[in-house]
Image (tube, helix red, strand yellow):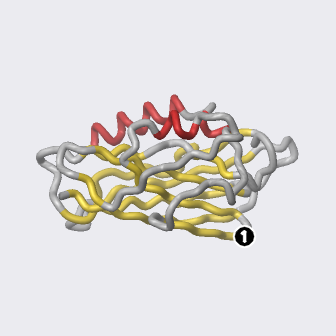
Amino acid sequence: MRSRWIAGMALAVLALPALSQRAMDAQSLQVPTIGSRGEANGFNGMLLVTPDADWKEKWNTPSSVTPHFTTATEVARGGKVFVLTFLANPGLDTQGMANVTCDLEVIRPDGSRSSSQDDVDCFKAKPQGPSTNVYLAAPVVVFSGDPGDPAGVWTVRVTLRDKVRHASVPLETTFELK
C-alpha cells in the first residue's frame, strides 16, 4: 500500500496546481458532514473521503457549477478511496500569496503507520477570488485496498499549517477496509 500511496500522492502533487485554484464560496461546497473539519485563527480545513474516481473532473468545473462528491465510510478490498483536503481563508503575505504546508499520516487498523510525510506543500499560490473561498489542497491521499492490507478502520491525519497566519489545523478522518 505504501508505494501506491506515495505514487498517488506524487501524481496528485503534480496534477493539482491548476485544480487547487478553483475558487468557490465556502457555503457552495455541498458535502455531508462525514469527514473532519477544523479551524484555527480564522483558517479552516476539511477532509473528505470519496470513492469518486472522477473527483478531479468534478472539482475542475466552472465556478458556477457546484461540485457534488459521494462520501465513503468504507472501501471493499480491491476498491479505492480518495481523501481530499479542502481549506479556506489562508493568510496572505504582502504579495497576496498563501503558504500552506501539511503533514500527512496514514494509520493501519493496528495503530502502525502505513505512511507519513511532513511539511508537504499543500497550497502555495495567489488565491483566485477572496481567500475565504474554498480551495482544494494538494496532495490527495489515494488508498487502494490491496490483498495484503489488514481489514479494519484506517485513519488519515492531515495537519494543515498556514505559514503566514501561523495557524495549524489538525484534521482526521477514517474509513473501514472490508
Q: Nearer the viewer, residue 78 or 115?
A: 78
Residue 91 occupies quadrant: bottom right
Residue at the spot of label 1:
41
Task: Name the residue at the left extreme.
Answer: 148
User: Residue 97: image x %, image y %?
Assistant: 77, 43
In the picture shown, does residue 37 fall above or below 77?
below
The picture places residue 53, in percent across and down from the top left corner, at 39, 38
Q: Residue furthest front?
A: 65
Residue 88 location, quadrant: bottom right
Q: Nearer the viewer, residue 130 or 39?
A: 130
Give the residue drawn at x 73%, y 57%: 89
Residue 164 location, x and y as percent?
75, 55
Residue drawn where x is 59% and y is 34% of the image: 60
- Which element carries disc 1, helix, strand or loop? loop
**Residue 49 position by quadrant:** bottom left
Q: At which x and y percent is residue 36?
A: 49, 66
Q: Which residue does the image show at 22% across and 47% down from the upper left?
A: 145
